[in-house]
Image (cartoon, grey):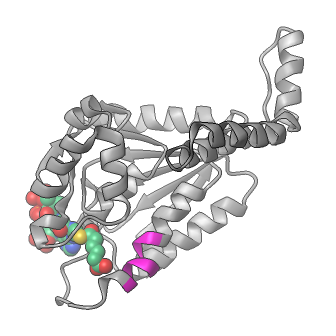
């Protein structure tokens, strides 16, 4: 059942998504793409969801495309447009912070799904592998964009061309991810981060994400204009009014996300 391949649980304003094909390190089969796209659309439409937590079941995070079935020499470009691309685009476009808890190996498109998220925390036992080259493919799912941007051209080239395991600690040292922590601390730390984000001004967080997404394609001047445009929206929010009132009344703000 494709329903079981990605699990959704809502708790305290956080939508928890668990990739759930642990026997194959949560590699994606056909039904899983539609399932995750559908869940991301549901989360986007649900005003009670104020942060997302993404992780994998079992010992892996995600080994990318399921390559265990019969080999297909199909049109991968067309396939990507209906499989991985809508998923990573939806993660980037979601006006909510997405915390990715990388519990184990993240390979191929699975690594790039993690890198599309806003906060990436990984278990020290986890690793990132741009595995495409190991099977004669080129990077996809945004890896050729994210990696040079995150770690610089020299390290990105090595990662993408050599297809070697990059341990989580090294990924953190390179700035590829936010943090590596012992496996036992991953879930509590990453969940605490997601819960904290879910109590923050959701609208302003979503607009901040839009600014971060837009920056690489903008000039400094264009980015200033976009900041002004989005600040106008944030300035009319209830959470802004609450933030100002709480400051004046010397109390903790109670943000509702609107
Ligand atoms: O179709 C298109 O449009 C092209 C798009 C491509 C996007 C991509 O993601 S391409 C990259 C695809 N992914 C890979 O090439 C990674 C393949 N997996 C591995 O290299 C290794 O499994 C890992 C390095 C990720 C982990 O190694 P290890 O030793 O920890 O685990 P393992 O024993 O290799 O894997 C455990 C099981 O998961 C094993 O099954 P078994 O023997 O216990 O029955 C293995 O076959 C299975 N598995 C791992 N990765 C995949 C997989 N099964 C199907 N697809 C996988 N990607």
Indicate the position of residue 81 as horizontal and vertical percent values.
Answer: 44, 79
| Relative vertical location of residue 191 with respect to residue 93 in this rendering, above or below | above
Is 104 within the magenta?
Answer: no
The quarter holding residue 70 reads bottom left
Indicate the position of residue 101 as horizontal and vertical percent values.
Answer: 39, 44
| Relative vertical location of residue 64 with respect to residue 179 in this rendering, above or below | below
Residue drawn at 41 percent across, 71 percent down: 84
| Relative vertical location of residue 252 with respect to residue 225 in this rendering, above or below | above
Horizontally, residue 248 falls left or right of residue 47, namely right
Question: How many labels, in total?
Answer: 0
- Pick whichever, 119 or 186, lies toward us: 119
- Pick whichever, 163 or 182, lies toward us: 163
The quadrant the C terminus occupies is top right
Residue drawn at 44 percent across, 58 percent down: 18
Q: Residue furthest top?
A: 250
| Relative vertical location of residue 105 with respect to residue 222 in this rendering, above or below | below
- Give the image quadrant in which the ligand numbered 1 is located: bottom left
Residue drawn at 17 percent across, 62 percent down: 131
The quadrant the N terminus occupies is bottom left
Highlighted magenta segment, given as a residue range:
78-85
Residue 202 in view here: no
Residue drawn at 39 percent across, 62 percent down: 19
- Pick whichever, 185 or 173, lies toward us: 173
Is 79 within the magenta?
Answer: yes
């Amino acid at each position: 059942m494709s329903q079981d391949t990605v699990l959704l649980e809502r708790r305290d304003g956080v939508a928890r998504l668990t990739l759930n094909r642990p026997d194959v390190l949560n590699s994606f089969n056909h039904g899983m793409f539609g399932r995750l796209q559908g869940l991301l659309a549901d989360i986007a439409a649900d005003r009670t969801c104020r942060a997302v937590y993404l992780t994998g079941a079992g010992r892996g995070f995600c080994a990318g495309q399921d390559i265990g079935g019969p080999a297909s020499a199909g049109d991968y470009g067309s396939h990507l447009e209906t499989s991985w691309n809508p998923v990573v685009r939806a993660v980037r476009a979601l006006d909510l912070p997405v915390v990715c808890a990388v519990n184990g190996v993240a390979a191929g498109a699975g690594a790039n799904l993690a890198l599309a998220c806003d906060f990436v925390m990984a278990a020290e036992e986890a690793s990132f592998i741009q595995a495409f080259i190991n099977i004669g493919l080129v990077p996809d799912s945004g890896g050729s964009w994210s990696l040079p941007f995150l770690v610089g051209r020299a390290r990105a080239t090595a990662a993408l061309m050599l297809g070697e395991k990059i341990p989580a600690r090294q990924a953190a040292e390179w700035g590829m991810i936010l943090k590596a922590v012992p496996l036992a601390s991953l879930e509590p730390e990453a969940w605490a981060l997601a819960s904290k984000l879910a109590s923050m001004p959701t609208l302003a967080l979503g607009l901040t994400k839009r600014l971060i997404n837009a920056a690489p394609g903008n000039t400094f001047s264009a980015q200033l204009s976009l900041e002004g445009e989005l600040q106008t929206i944030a300035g009319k929010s209830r959470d802004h009014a609450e933030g100002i009132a709480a400051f004046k009344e010397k109390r903790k703000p109670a943000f509702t996300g609107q």
